Image: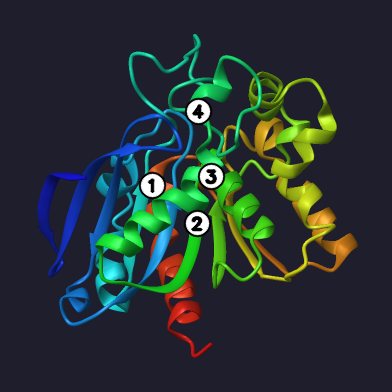
Amino acid sequence: MQRIEHRACFGGWQDVYEHASATLGCTMRFAIYLPPQAADGPVPVLYWLSGLTCTEQNFITKAGAQRYAAEHGIAIVCPDTSPRGDDVADAAGYDLGMGAGFYVNATQAPWSVHYRMYDYVVEELPALVAANFPVTEARAISGHSMGGHGALVIALRNPGRYRSVSAFAPIVAPSQVPWGQKAFAAYLGDDRAAWQAYDATALVASASERLPLLVDQGDADEFLAAQLRPELLREACAVHGHPLVLRMQPGHDHSYYFIASFIGEHVAHHAAAMHAVA
């Protein structure tokens, strides 16, 4: 593992590391913000999953989250959104291939060789972070758009692993919208039953842990009606009794201006859950 960026920020450090990923079979980058409290001992860690076309850079340069992480004494880890490299499969367009891993374990060629972002986020990256940085076992997870989908799915599929989960403008029902249908058909094949393991609206039906879901969605989001469909998550949670706070934010679109407007509230939400005595 090699540190390739090291910047002072709100009394802590915003770093970026590069490492060889055994899970993905390529070199990966991730960003980690360590608050000033980490100098005195381990701190809880929030994992942030970014959306289509993003890398580890978008969140750390646009969201303004470091200020709040320093205030609450938590680390933030931001992985890239897909495997990368000359030998990694890719496709034309922004919504499949590099930059569009969808946080699944692909089963179909040629994607199955490298595209195992679910295992990377759930297993390999947290193990690497725990072994090399001053973090506690208290974890939370959040994300935006495709990353919001990933955060919800990973939290629902791993009871007890995360203290809290939230999402900004998540793709809540990828099996029912064009972005998800295109990605799932390529990565997982045509058997739609296999898609349900990565669909938050399907997973709430069988979730063994009723971890509350916090979702913020802009009502001026250009992808709201066709790709995001938050009403489907609201309906599924109502039917299955899963706790959900869905906040429609007037005037906000899909951009990082939206994320920056509410990231302080999300960091506070996660910090309260992670600092609470288990």
What distance separates the C-alpha of mark 3 from that of mark 2?
Answer: 16 Å
Residue type (three-letter) at the residue carrying disc 1: Tyr
In the figure, residue 216 lies in which quadrant?
bottom right
Whether residue 143 can be seen here: no
Whether residue 87 can be seen here: yes
The single residue placed furthest to the right in the displayed view is: 239
Depth-wise, is mark 3 or mark 4 nearer the camera? Answer: 3
Residue type (three-letter) at the residue carrying disc 2: Ser
Number of residues whose C-alpha sits closer than 10 Å to that of mark 3, classed few (under 14), some (14–19) or many (20 or more)? some
- Picture coordinates of residue 148, whole percent (x, y): 56, 48
Residue type (three-letter) at the residue carrying disc 4: Ala
Depth-wise, is mark 3 or mark 1 nearer the camera? Answer: 3
Q: Residue at the spot x=18%, y=52% of the render?
A: 15
What distance separates the C-alpha of mark 3 from that of mark 1?
Answer: 30 Å
Number of residues whose C-alpha sits closer than 10 Å to that of mark 4, classed few (under 14), some (14–19) or many (20 or more)? many
In the figure, residue 95 lies in which quadrant?
top right
- Picture coordinates of residue 253, whole percent (x, y): 51, 41
Q: Are marks 3 and 4 in contact (CB under 8 Å)?
A: no
Which comes before the other along the chain, label 3 or label 1?
3
Placement of 115 over or under 157, stated as above or below: above
| Mark carried by residue 142 | 2
Q: Residue at the spot x=54%, y=73% of the render?
A: 163
For label 3, the SS is helix
Depth-wise, is mark 3 or mark 2 nearer the camera? Answer: 3
Q: Tell whether 178 sits left or right of 99.
A: right
- Picture coordinates of residue 170, whole percent (x, y): 60, 46
What distance separates the C-alpha of mark 2 from that of mark 1?
Answer: 17 Å
| Mark carried by residue 100 | 4
Give the residue number, with chain letter if any, for mark 3.
119
Number of residues whose C-alpha sits closer than 10 Å to that of mark 1, classed few (under 14), some (14–19) or many (20 or more)? few
| Mark carried by residue 257 | 1
What distance separates the C-alpha of mark 1 from that of mark 4?
Answer: 21 Å
